[in-house]
Image (spheres, rainbow, N blue to C red):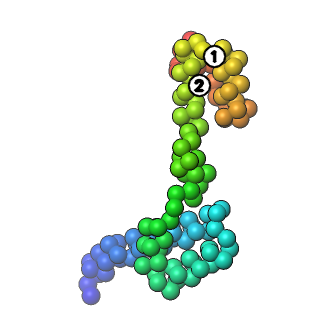
Amino acid sequence: MPWFWQTFLLLLVTVPVLTMFAYAAWDVVRRPDFAVFARGIWLLAFCFVPIIGPLIYLAIRPPGTTATERAMAEGGTSAADELVRLADLHDRQKLTDTEYQAAKAQHLGPGSGQPESVMQQRGGV
């Protein structure tokens, strides 16, 4: 087989299949809601049925792999959405500077290196 077709098949088939396998395996390993037995079963399925196993897992896996996905699936808001809401309340003068800083520190953590006020964040004087 000429080198061109070998390279073409490598890039078209092998790389995506390996990427899918690695992503599915990583997702199974880092999932906090799976027991060790369930993780082992999925990883064995990936090994014995290399293309179909990861495809089935990725198709049927429920949301909630990460804390952010769980919060979004439960209808919660992300930290960025909450900060936008707080900035809007501050702009409408519903929150004082002190209240805004306290609420922002609660979401970002103290000492996050953020500017002190909304005006500074937006480049104002």
Residue 20 falls left or right of residue 78: left
User: How many angstroms separate mark 2 from mark 1 (CA)?
Assistant: 8 Å
Neighbor class of circle 1 (other Cα within 10 Å; few <14, some 14-19, many 20+) is some
Compared with 8, 81 (above or below) is above
Percent position of residue 80, x then y: 55, 36
Can you tell which mark lies on residue 95? 1
Taking the image as drawn, is residue 41 in sight? yes
Location of residue 8 by image quarter? bottom left
Q: Secondary structure at mark 1?
A: loop
Q: Are marks 2 and 1 in contact (CB under 8 Å)?
A: yes
Can you tell which mark lies on residue 86? 2
Percent position of residue 35, x then y: 67, 71
Residue in the picture at 68% in, 74% down: 36
Residue in the picture at 26% in, 78% down: 4
Compared with 107, 90 (above or below) is above
Compared with 30, 106 (above or below) is above
Q: Name the residue type under label 1.
A: Leu
Compared with 114, 98 (above or below) is above
